[in-house]
Amino acid sequence: MNEQEKPDSAGRGQIVLAGTPIGNIGDASTRLVELLQTADIVAAEDTRRLHKLLHALGITASGKIISYHEHNEATRTAELLELIRGGKTLIMVTDAGMPAVSDPGFRLVEAAVEDGVVVTAIPGPSAVLTALALSGLPTDRFTFEGFLPRKAGERSARLSDLVDEKRTMVFFEAPHRLEPMLRALDTSFGPDRRVAVCRELTKLHEEVLRGPVRELLEWSESSEVRGEIAVVVAGAPDAEPEQAEDHVAAVNELIGQGSRLKDAVAAVAADARISKRELYSAVLAARS
């Protein structure tokens, strides 16, 4: 494991990933405000949104503002790293939430780690964790799945891969694609799978709807959905345990083929991984 060098030990700078408000400006941290004002470089997913954020906070950035988004990450990463190697401090912000989480930033972090450049973070608002916490679904184990594919076939294939996922799943979705997504969930996971649709989190019109996917699908069909959306989906339920009574027919089938009762019970119990004693009793009970 390569330990990052400290900025002052080698004359190098650092990258600071900074979480920005996902809706309520009051969620901006003191550290975020301070570093936006003092950093040598501010790398922003959208410089126009950055200026709106600065205006809302009543501050001015003293450093150089550079756009850094999915369309220029590949070419701009090397340029930013060169500046940081010269001792500059760079703060990376996206439109909302934490950089590198379904937002630009991963390429920069990956390259910085490879180069030995210090990367740290100012923790802040996260739509993923906020939606998970408000969903009412299990939070001990979860997975973030980002946006599902737009094309129906690819979306169904992705959900097919997730149908047996036991962990709670968090997705992002656009308002106009929410209904098709819920319909796909209904088809792939069944109408009773529990879901929470979280809309406009931390904003004035925040709304969290919870219920079976079929119920929320019907809601989406009759509503004009707007705003930023996160969808939290319960993991696959545990399979019902095998019951001895369910395997009596298999035992009788083997007996009909010439097996002794004892041998048939042993074979079926081993295959089904159930108790031989319980299966034997179930066979006798069925005959009485």
Image: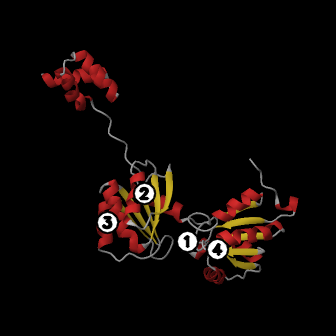
In the rendered image, which residue does mark 2 sit on?
A: 158
Residue at point 39%, 51% (across, down): 163
Distance from Cα at disc 3 to Cα at disc 1: 25 Å
Residue closer to the observer: 18 or 190: 190
Crowding at dot 4, Cα within 10 Å, few <14 / some 14-19 / many 20+, comes out as: few
Q: Which residue is mark 1?
A: 22
Give the CA distance from mark 4 to mark 3: 37 Å
Q: Is residue 253 left or right of residue 268?
A: left
Crowd rating for badge 2 (residues with CA inside 10 Å; few <14, some 14–19, many 20+)? some
Helix, strand or loop for disc 2: helix
Residue 217: numbered disc: 3
| Dots 2, 3 in contact, CB < 8 A | no
Is the C-beta separation of discs 2 and 1 under 8 Å? no
Q: Earlier in the sequence, mark 1 or mark 4?
A: 1
Residue type at mark 3?
Leu
Q: Which is closer to the viewer, label 3 or label 1?
A: 3
Across and down, in percent, residue 211 comes to 34, 60
Q: Is residue 219 left or right of residue 19?
A: left
Q: Nearer the viewer, residue 93 or 67?
A: 67
Task: Residue under label 4, please give it.
Answer: 72
Q: Position of residue 273 (x, y in %)?
A: 35, 28
Identify the secondary structure beneath mark 1.
loop
Relative depth, front residue between 180 and 51: 180
Instruction: Give the foreground label among 4 and 3.
Output: 4
Distance of label 2 from label 1 (alpha carbons): 27 Å
Callout 2 amino acid = Arg
Q: Residue at x 87, y 60 (%)?
A: 10
Q: Is residue 51 visible?
A: yes
Q: Are marks 4 and 3 in contact (CB under 8 Å)?
A: no
Labels 4 and 3: the sequence-earlier one: 4
Q: Nearer the viewer, mark 2 or mark 3?
A: 2
Label located before the other in sequence (4 or 2): 4
